[in-house]
Image (cartoon, grey):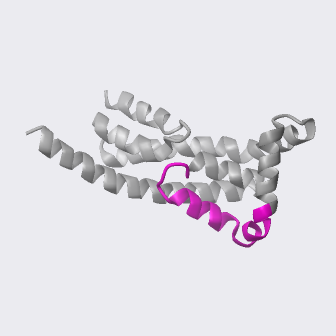
Amino acid sequence: MLVRRFIYTFLVSMIPAIEIKGAIPFGIALGVPAPAAFAAALCGSSLVACFLAFFTHWFYEACRRRHLFPHFTGWMGKITAKHQDSFQRFGPLAIFAYVAVPVPGTGTWTGAIIAGVFNLKPKSILLSVFCGNVVSGLIVTLVGNGLVGMAKSIFIQ
């Protein structure tokens, strides 16, 4: 039974916008111990980052050359041109900080996509996204474990 809940937590963490930040409280609410929920969510969201690290830049360039999704590629081109200098200066550290902040819209999906469009090496993408994901997950685990425990003590007595 616990294995099934662990797998659910793993799968939920792979969903864009939910990622590790939503999967950890989900797993804890299902009854998965906090360290196991953290591990499942970290593994699932890191698996997504592995895929994105290797294919994002290739996909972006293929779309740009073939004029597919012109509004999206044009918009991304403008953003990369505008922030190229600051990204070259901070690179992986900027991606780490972006992913580490546990707020909606920042996470493995967007961090890996941004790094891929900026043509960061896959090894750098994986390292910066994974480390940021660990920090974000630890913050969410500590907060989520406290909130779920408080809710259980209030409503289950």
Q: Residue at x 50, y 59 (%)?
A: 101
Whether residue 119 is visible here, answered yes or no, is no
- Residue 14 appears at what percent x and percent y? 53, 37
Quadrant in which residue 143 is drawn: bottom left
Q: Residue furthest bottom?
A: 89
Q: Quadrant of residue 23?
A: top left
> With respect to residue 89, does 116 lie above or below?
above
Q: Position of residue 91 (x, y in %)?
A: 70, 66
Q: Is residue 28 magenta?
A: no
In percent of width and height, residue 107 lies at 55, 50
Front one among 116 and 44: 116
Asked if residue 109 lies left or right of residue 156, the reply is: right
25 or 69: nearer the viewer: 69
- Which image quarter is the C terminus in? top left
Q: In the picture provided, is 84 more to the left or to the right than 38?
A: right
User: Viewer-proximal residue, 3 or 129?
Assistant: 129
Most common SS among magenta residues: helix
- Magenta segment: 82-106
Check residue 100 for magenta coloring: yes
Residue at image x 31%, y 26%?
A: 1
Say left or right for 115 vs 139.
Answer: right
Residue 146 visible to the viewer: yes
Q: Residue at x 80, y 55 (%)?
A: 78
Report the number of discs: 0
Where is residue 80 shown, x and y percent of the image? 78, 58
